[in-house]
Image (tube, rainbow, N blue to C red):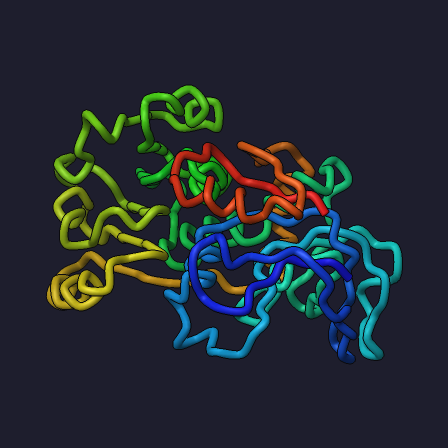
């Protein structure tokens, strides 16, 4: 099969397009003919070697944490899926594997693609939507009526987070983004939109029940005074030094700080699928690239200017 792969850590220049072995499903896995995948910041952070303590030195590596396509083979223990099913999910091997013509998904991480989604739209969903949902619901413990702020509201995770916060019953959703994307964020349901160039949300004293920093540009220490009593701060990509200072800052406080990485959960993705099917949540795609141009897609993602997701067609 053809795939994007790299044999050393480095810039986008290390990415290659060519033949790689077609994977064989284990008993609890399905093999998917990938029709679409996407680019997430974790992909180029892995490629750069930022996570080499986790991803190791075994090469080649195939990136891509999103898979959307059709089942072409099933393992011996598979009961939920059959050949021909349209499925999507987030591979759980730690590196990815989605930027290829075929990829493996464990049965527990896969879900059926909603009938109203194209493969391109589905390829944009798993990692970003799971991150948004788990940040708000599981770690942020969002309650009906909460005042919620999403920092990075126009990005891949942020566009899902604004919509999911409303779906979960938030009373007020504030989106923080650049001025060019303000109308997009409003269209997703944000009640307030702040221009990060002109408004420092950390100065909004005791205003928010939950702050989700989807782009890792702040810290609990910086945001704590903007949180109300029992407020929660959640992020996925903090500065390393901030983790220690944030934990110390919450030691004697009613407020809390949570750092997490999205988990590959098919049950969570199935709930998100129901929202997508109902039109409660929609997919925002900034640009689409063919698989062969993944290096260019990485470079675009690294600019931080994408509004919504960057999709790869396979």
Q: Residue at x 82, y 63 (%)?
A: 81
Q: Residue at x 48, y 78 (%)?
A: 57
The number of numbered badges drawn on the structure is 0
In the image, residue 3 lies at what x, y percent?
A: 68, 59
In what quadrant of the picture does the N terminus appear? bottom right
Q: Front-most of 227 and 58?
A: 58
Q: In this view, does 313 lie to the left or right of 296?
A: right
Q: Front-most of 26 and 147?
A: 26
Q: Front-most of 224 and 8?
A: 8
Residue 178 vertical position relative to residue 155 in the rendered view, above or below:
above
Quarter-of-image position of residue 161: top left
Q: Can residue 123 be seen in this view?
A: yes
Residue 278 vertical position relative to residue 267 in the rendered view, above or below:
above
Q: Front-most of 29 and 203?
A: 29
Quarter-of-image position of residue 279: top right
In the image, residue 63 lies at what x, y percent?
A: 57, 61
In the image, residue 103 lies at what x, y percent?
A: 71, 63
Q: Can residue 134 be seen in this view?
A: no
In the image, residue 309 lies at what x, y percent?
A: 53, 39
């Amino acid at each position: 099969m053809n795939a994007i792969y790299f044999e050393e850590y480095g810039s986008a220049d290390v990415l290659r397009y060519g033949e790689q072995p077609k994977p064989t499903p284990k008993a609890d896995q399905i093999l998917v003919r990938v029709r679409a995948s996407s680019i997430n910041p974790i992909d180029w952070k892995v490629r750069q070697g930022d996570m080499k303590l986790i991803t190791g030195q075994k090469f080649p590596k195939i990136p891509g944490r999103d898979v959307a396509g059709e089942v072409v083979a099933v393992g011996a223990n598979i009961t939920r899926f059959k050949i021909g099913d349209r499925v999507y999910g987030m591979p759980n091997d730690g590196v990815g594997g989605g930027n290829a013509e075929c990829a493996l998904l464990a049965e527990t991480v896969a879900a059926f693609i909603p009938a109203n989604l194209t493969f391109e739209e589905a390829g944009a969903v798993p990692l970003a939507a799971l991150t948004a949902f788990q940040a708000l619901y599981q770690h942020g413990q969002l309650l009906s009526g909460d005042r919620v702020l999403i920092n990075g509201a126009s990005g891949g995770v942020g566009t899902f987070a604004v919509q999911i916060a409303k779906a979960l019953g938030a009373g007020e959703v504030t989106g923080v983004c650049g001025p060019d994307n303000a109308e997009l964020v409003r269209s997703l349901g944000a009640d307030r939109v702040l221009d990060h160039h002109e408004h420092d949300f950390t100065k909004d004293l005791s205003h928010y029940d939950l702050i989700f920093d989807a782009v890792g540009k702040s810290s609990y220490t910086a945001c704590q005074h903007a949180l109300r009593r029992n407020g929660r701060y959640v992020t996925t990509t903090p500065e390393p030094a901030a983790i220690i200072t944030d934990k110390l800052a919450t030691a004697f406080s009613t407020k809390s700080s949570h750092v997490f990485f999205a988990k590959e959960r098919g049950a969570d993705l199935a709930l998100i699928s129901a929202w997508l099917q109902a039109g409660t949540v929609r997919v925002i795609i900034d640009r689409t690239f063919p698989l062969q141009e993944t290096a260019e897609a990485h470079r675009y993602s690294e600019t931080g200017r994408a509004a919504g997701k960057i999709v790869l067609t396979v």
